[in-house]
């Protein structure tokens, strides 16, 4: 995420990504909030997204690991709130303050994040 992202754009981006043929429930996800301004994110949209994910993964036989990098207090607090709202989803969802801890947990190298940043992958 980069800058301020509206609730509508947040929901539409993730729904499109998760409904894409390229996404499988065995794909791990890395959410990078280091450059995000999360001050506009509402608790209501987090609840809507949690409900969507419960339905999306209801029939899944495999589940993603989701690592969220959230060094800023607001982003970290909102990500932890989402973690609580989505606690009934059978996935591994963990919020980290540091990049190194998140990448180590996902078992990927720092090079992956560098490649993503070079290619402009962002919301």
Image (cartoon, rainbow, N blue to C red):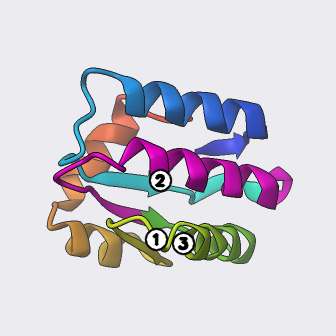
In the image, residue 91 lies in the stretch drawn in magenta: no
Where disc 3 sits, the SS reads helix
Q: Where is residue 90 in the image (x, y as percent from the top left)?
A: 33, 67
Marks 1 and 3: in contact by CB < 8 Å? no
- Left or right of 15 in this view: 62: left
Q: Could you tell which of marks 2 and 1 lies nearer the N-terminus?
A: 2
Where disc 1 sits, the SS reads loop
Residue segment shown in magenta: 39-67
Depicted 108 relative to depicted 57: above or below: below
In the image, residue 59 lies in the stretch drawn in magenta: yes
> What quarter of the picture does the C terminus occupy?
top right
* Residue 120 visible in the current orientation: no
Where disc 2 sits, the SS reads helix
Local packing at callout 1 (Cα closer than 10 Å; few below 14, some 14-19, many 20+) is few
Depicted 62 relative to depicted 22: above or below: below
Q: Name the residue under label 2.
A: 54
Depicted 60 relative to depicted 97: above or below: above
């Amino acid at each position: 995420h980069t800058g301020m992202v509206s609730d509508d754009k947040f929901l539409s981006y993730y729904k499109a990504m998760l409904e894409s043929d390229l996404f499988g429930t065995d794909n791990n996800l890395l959410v990078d909030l280091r450059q995000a301004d999360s001050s506009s994110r509402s608790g209501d949209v987090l609840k809507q997204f949690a409900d969507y994910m419960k339905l999306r993964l209801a029939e899944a036989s495999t589940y993603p690991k989701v690592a969220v990098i959230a060094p800023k207090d607001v982003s970290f607090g909102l990500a932890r709130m989402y973690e609580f709202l989505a606690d009934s989803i059978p996935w591994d969802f963990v919020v980290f303050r540091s990049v190194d801890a998140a990448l180590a947990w996902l078992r990927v190298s720092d090079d992956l994040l560098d490649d993503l940043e070079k290619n402009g992958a962002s919301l």
